[in-house]
Amino acid sequence: MKLKKISLFLLANIIGLTVMAEGYQLNTQSARQLGMGHLGTALKLGGESMLFNPAGLSFMNGKVDISLGATGVFSKVTYTSGTYTAQTDNPTGTPLFGYIGVKVVKNLYAGISITNPAGNSLFWPDNWNGSHFVQNISLKAFSVQPTISYKFSDKFSIGAGVMVDFGDFEYNKGLMPVNGLNGYLASPVFPSAYKTIITNASGMSPVSANLSGKASPAVGFNVGILYSPNERWSIGLSYRSKVMLKVNEGVTVLNYATPELKSLMRTLSIAPASTNPLYNPSVATVTSLDGESFTSELPVPSNTNLGVAFKATKKLLLSAELQYVGWKAYDTLKIVFPNITSVTPKNFKNTMIYRIGAEYKACEKFTARMGFIYDSTPVDLNQYGPESPGSNKMSVTVGATYQVFKAMAVDLGFQFNNGQKTTGKIIQNGVTVLGGDFKTIAFLPSFGLRFNF
């Protein structure tokens, strides 16, 4: 049964991810709107309305509206426990977005978008104190959404889209603590040559698992309504459904600290004990995971958005928005190895994101924006893994648009994301196996181009 227990422990942490939208959801799909607090449910944004509220697509100007760009994610997580400190060295994330909207006939519009609804890159030191939970992890999810929108009048429109989501992930974690083999060093019968191999690997994770897989395409939907009672006010409501990403053919590969340690651990795994006095069933359990396949699934949560916008003056636009995120869909994590099924509690809860933003049109060529976001964490502080170091976050955003000429505009946005220091722990069988303070900060610059014909 030890194989089963270690397999379940390993798999329970495969896809617990985090990024700058609390959880692992991304809210970076527009440089223009990122500068305004990444809101847009009550706004008429042309092609970009396909994400924020598909009803707004039918208010686009011209016959073709194109928007594309990318956001850089520069993030860092710091872990502190007593006098010990570890810090991530994350690569730069670059979530992309692209929208193409077209006028089909009078009042009927259609389009297609591609965005990154979820993603993460989190790299801890290979031999840090929590390496047996996570060393590094990477997730990329894509969503392709064909959309239609119909405008009944200048006051009311509806829209809907079909989301086809897919992606891939890679995850590395130590299978035992850095000093997991040190018990052999005190044994009077353990060969000295083998003790030297263990000593030479001191301070390194003895063996790590690399898990990777691709999520098959999964389908969801996005619907919305937009109502403008007059020229100054507009109200929008939109809903994006949950999409369950499924990894059907994941692969596990083991990596050892040194070639000599790999040979030694295989020697310790040769059964039975009656013919191999060095046989260790726990080590054999670890080495047997090499080449194992697995299946799992990860929800991209539902989102319900309610927004209101007010044209305070001819130049000043104000907007506020509530975003209700259905994180409870990630209340458990089910992982399946051959002949083994694990259901691990994650206990995520539904959360609210609060957004306010302002846009000021200084002149025909230049528009400035700013915004504020408060994003509450869904994570359980007693199931707080370093692969998902969530916290309540506050963000300030700024942005601008330069209208190069009538058919082309350049958008810039910037977000500073400041996570509240959070004390979390992992409890297993009533015992705290890892705990401490986690602090997250991030900088998100964004660039976009828009074309209208």
Image (cartoon, rainbow, N blue to C red):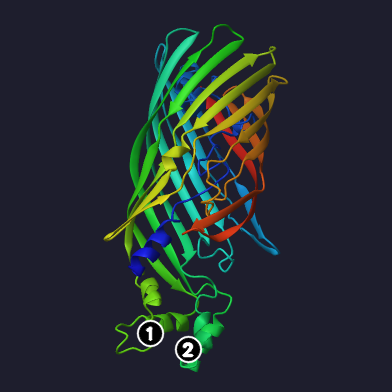
Q: Position of residue 336 (x, y in %)?
A: 32, 55
Instruction: Please count the marks in the image.
Output: 2
Residue at (34% x, 42% y) in the render: 217
* Helix, strand or loop at mark 2: helix
Query: Is 331 displayed left or right of 422 in the figure?
Result: left
- Return the residue nearer the eye: 231 or 20: 20
Nearer-the-camera pick, 141 or 440: 440
**Residue at the far front in the pictured view:** 430
Whether residue 62 is situated above or below residue 12 in the rendered picture? above
Residue 294 place in picture, x, y as percent: 33, 58
Number of residues whose C-alpha sits closer than 10 Å to that of mark 2, classed few (under 14), some (14–19) or many (20 or more): some
Say which quadrant the N terminus sits in: bottom left
Quarter of the image where one finds residue 239: top left
- Indicate which disc, 2 or 1, sits on the residue closer to the N terminus: 2
**Picture disc at residue 194:** 2
The residue sitting at 52% across, 72% down in the picture is 205
Name the residue beneath numbered marker 1: 267
Three-letter code, disc 2: Tyr
- Residue at the image position 48 percent from the left and 70 percent from the top: 176
Viewer-proximal residue, 429 or 437? 429
Can residue 63 be seen by looking at this rendering? no
